[in-house]
Every structure is written in C-alpha cells, then in structure tokens.
Amino acid sequence: MAYNDLREWIAALERAGELKRVRTEVDPILEITEITDRVSKSGKPTNLPKMKPGGPALLFENVKGHPGAQVLINQFGSEDRMKLALGVDALEDISGRIHQLMNIKSPEGFLEKVKMLPMLAEFGKFFPKTVATGPCKEVIKKDNCSLLDLPVLKCWPQDGGRFITLPCVITRDPRTGKRNVGMYRMQIYDERTAGMHWQRQKVAAEHYRDMMRMAATQSASGSVGGTSSASRSGAVDIMARSLGGSVLAEGERPSGKLEVAVVIGTDPALTFSAIVPAPPDVEEFIVAGFLRQKPIELVKCETVDLEVPASAEIVLEGYVNLDELRTEGPFGDHTGFYSLEDEYPVFHLTCITHRKNPIYATTIVGKPPMEDAYMGKAVERIFLPLMRLTLPEIVDVNLPIEGVFHNLMIVSIKKSYPGHARKVMSGIWALGQAMFTKCIIVVDEDVDVQDIADVTLKALNHIDPERDIQFTMGPVDSLDHASRMPNYGSKMGIDATRKWATEGFTRPWPDEIRMDEKTKAAVDKKWKELGIE
C-alpha cells in the first residue's frame, strides 16, 4: 500500500492499533526522549513489560513551548510497523523487486530490447514527477522564518543542543545534476543556522567536496599568469581533505556555496529511502517510488534550485558555505555513547514552507534497541540480494542490534575453496558502507546466523585464534570513538568455518552431536504419556 503523505501513514498506524496519542504536556528538552526510550525498550523487565517489543508509535499533541505543535516519534519502532510502512507481509518480499531495480542490464539485439519494453515501462512509473504546487506550500515564510519555531528535541543531557534527527536532506551533484536524499542530523545553533553533520563517506559530503574542487580549480585557473596542472591538483587535494578533518587556515578554503533543502515529515517509504545504501547513480526518489509502487510528486523550492516532495510537512531551504565550518556536538548516538565534538559545515536558512498545522517527525538514538534498530534490520533483509550480486556465496547475514550495525557482521557462506572466508571478508570491506564493519565473523552455511547462541557455540569451537583471526587497516566509521585516529583504524575478520586439509589443517574434524531420527521419532510418540509436561 502506498501512503501519499505522513498523515495517511499516521491514520494507518492508528487503524492498526500501532499509535498512541499523548495529550499530557511534555518537554522537548529530554522528556520526550526519556518517554520514548522506555517505550522503545518495552518488553524488558524494567521497561514497560506489558507492551510488545518496540511499543507503539507516539504522537505528542501538547509540546511545552510550542502551542499546537505535534511530534511524531517511534513510527518505525517495531518489525510490524516496518512491514506496514513498506506495505508487505515480510520484508523479504521486497528483495526481488529491489534486485530488479538495481540490476537492469543493457539489452543486446532487437528482440531483447522488445522484451525489455514492458519492464522499462513499469519502472518508468516510479520516476518522480514535478507538479506545480502541493500541500508543503500552504505556508511560505522567507523574512520571518526561524528554526526555533520547530519543536526540535534535545535528546540527551550532554548533547550540544537541540538536534533535528529525522531529516531528508536533499543536495544536487554539481557535476551530473543528480539529486541525493540522505539523512544527516542537524544541530540548531540559532534562528537561521544549524550544523550539517555530513560524515566524509556520505554522498552529500562528496557533493560538498566536488563544489570545493570546482571552486578551487576555477580560482587557480583564474590567477595571474595562470597555474600549472600540478598546482591546481594540489589545491584540489587540500579542499578534498577538509570535510571531517582539520580546519583549514585562512584563505585555503574556496568561496561559494552548495544549495540544500531539508524535508521533515514525509511518507514512510521516502523517509526509509533516505537511509538505504542505494547505488550512487540511483536517486532515492526512484527507490521510494519503487517501494511505494507509485511516483513521488515534487515541487520546486522557493529560494534554491532543488525539488522537494509536494506532500511534505515541513521544508527548510538554504545553503552551506564552502569556506565555513563550525563545532557540532556532542550528540548521544546510536552506539550508546556520545559522539564527540568536531567541525562540520553550517546550514543557513533562507526559507521555510510547511503545511497548515505541520507534524514534526523525529527520532532518537542511543543504547539499543531503539527505533533505528528496526530500520537497520529492514535494510539488512531487503538488501541481502544486492550483497549476493557481488558475493553470491553468501547464504545469510546478521547485523546484531547490539553491534550497532557497523561493529559486527555475522555471515554464513557456501565454502568452496581454501581461504574462501577471507575472500568474503575482503569483499564485504569493499562494499560501500560495509567498509566500516569493525568485526566480521564468517561461518559455514549450516550455521543459523540469526541464532546468536548457535553462532557463539560454532564460532568459538571452530577457531584457533592465532590462525583464524586477521587484522586490516582502513577507513572506519566516524562514530568509532575507539579508533586510533578519527575515521581511520583497524578491522578484524574471524574465519569460523570448518578448516580443510587444503588450508593446512590435517587433524580430523569432529562431527556435531545430533540424535538420530529414529530415536527422536520414537520419543515423539511416547512424549505425552511420559507425563513430563
């Protein structure tokens, strides 16, 4: 089922008994976080044990300091709600459709082209289309717009301020014109400025670097007497290293700006699409259309050359300067620890458009499980077939919630040759954001990677630590506070597969203890008369 906007989605949640309206006054400073954290962790002995895991979505209708405002949170905070959001009975139902979307090959010959026409026509239905106007334009504020009007949360006591945590941030590639929709937190500084947390591996960060490269090249080529290609290359290198690194000296950074639109409160498919690891050449608007089986309608912004969803609740228009960084953080992150202060670009607000009585959609992150855990598990299930495109030997993958997705990946494989597990480790570290995986455990195909007890038993029995653990150096997640340097450190791979003689293991490998089927069947027949239960 496709939801046209956030309001249709909220109505569906309410019909399904998955929404709780909260009419008691609550403070966006810390209180909403504490309430939501208890609900997210429901089912534990100390956290609302009568609720089912994840609790309900919450719609706060009485927010202190913001009369009339509504705050939606925990909308994706259970497996059932993730399936409802994407209109499926099982998350795996989407895998085949995603596989098709990402794996269109150029046809060879006339007959193949003819056969592909219906498929292309079907995919064409999901491309976004621009319309004249939409509900997001019901109220337009240019001169009197303020970020402080939004009921933005301060989530944790040591946070550097209030943070927008569920924004769909839209930028345009300055080279190709392709749009990107990503999700990056934003710290509110004042009425018109906010931090833009573009970690260096994110697509929007690359757009920002590309703008700096272009500005640096133009500046160098326009200098008196010209400049050599080597000098221009050096200038570009300086610009490319700036984001997420040290603040550059006065005059090193080029002038200019990158336009940005920030959308808050969209239909669930688009919000989810902002976090999926889609290939760089596929716009998230197309992914969202494909998930919805219906195109996203876009409208032109008022003050920047970008398009935004016509049915969005709130749109923030603005830009980031290429020559401006500012301290952002700390922020209580999904690792369960605070991510530390660092320098990031600054978003400057030029306009706010919104629906009448807009609904502010947000989330919180912290010690798992929380709402993002269910979103991450959905990504795991849906995009497993994409991993198999590159690594077809993969049987299944588990990113345990407590591993906060970049700390631990458990992988089962069909082992076919000596050293196969190590090849898979290297392949995973070469796959997009999977390159940040700190620890990879590779097991045989008969191990259920979703069963942590089974993995623990088999993996720890199967390894000789000195022989089967390997270390490598490379990029790590920006949130990894234990790495020796920001964004750079070590990663570990564990080969927990059975060892073969061709891998130098000459000892016998014992069989796993299992009862024979005849005895099990005999006991099954007499189980009730045993009177044990």
Image (cartoon, rainbow, N blue to C red):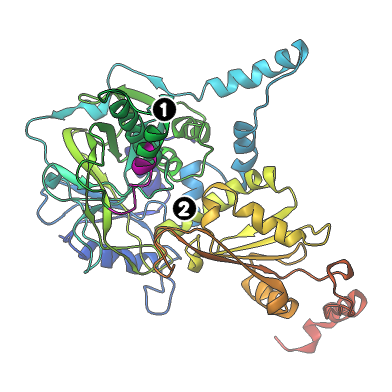
**The C terminus lies in quadrant:** bottom right
Q: Which residues are magenta?
A: 236-246
Residue under the point 37% across and 32% down: 232
Q: Out of 134 and 417, give the one closest to the viewer.
A: 417
Residue under the point 26% across and 27% down: 135
Residue under the point 53% across and 50% down: 379
Q: Which residue is mark 2?
A: 375
Q: Which residue is mark 1?
A: 296
Q: Residues within 10 Å of mark 1 (few under 14, many from 20)?
A: many
Give the total of numbered labels.
2
Q: Secondary structure at mark 1?
A: loop
Q: Tell me if label 1 and label 2 are in contact, CB under 8 Å.
A: no
Query: Where 285 falls versus 470 (above or below)?
Result: above
What is the three-letter code of the residue carrying label 2? Met
Q: Secondary structure at mark 2?
A: helix
As drawn, is 411 to the left or to the right of 339? right
Residue 137 appears in view: yes
Most distant residue in the left direction: 144
Question: Residue 211 lies in what quarter of the image?
Answer: top left
Query: Where 234 falls versus 158 (above or below)?
Result: above
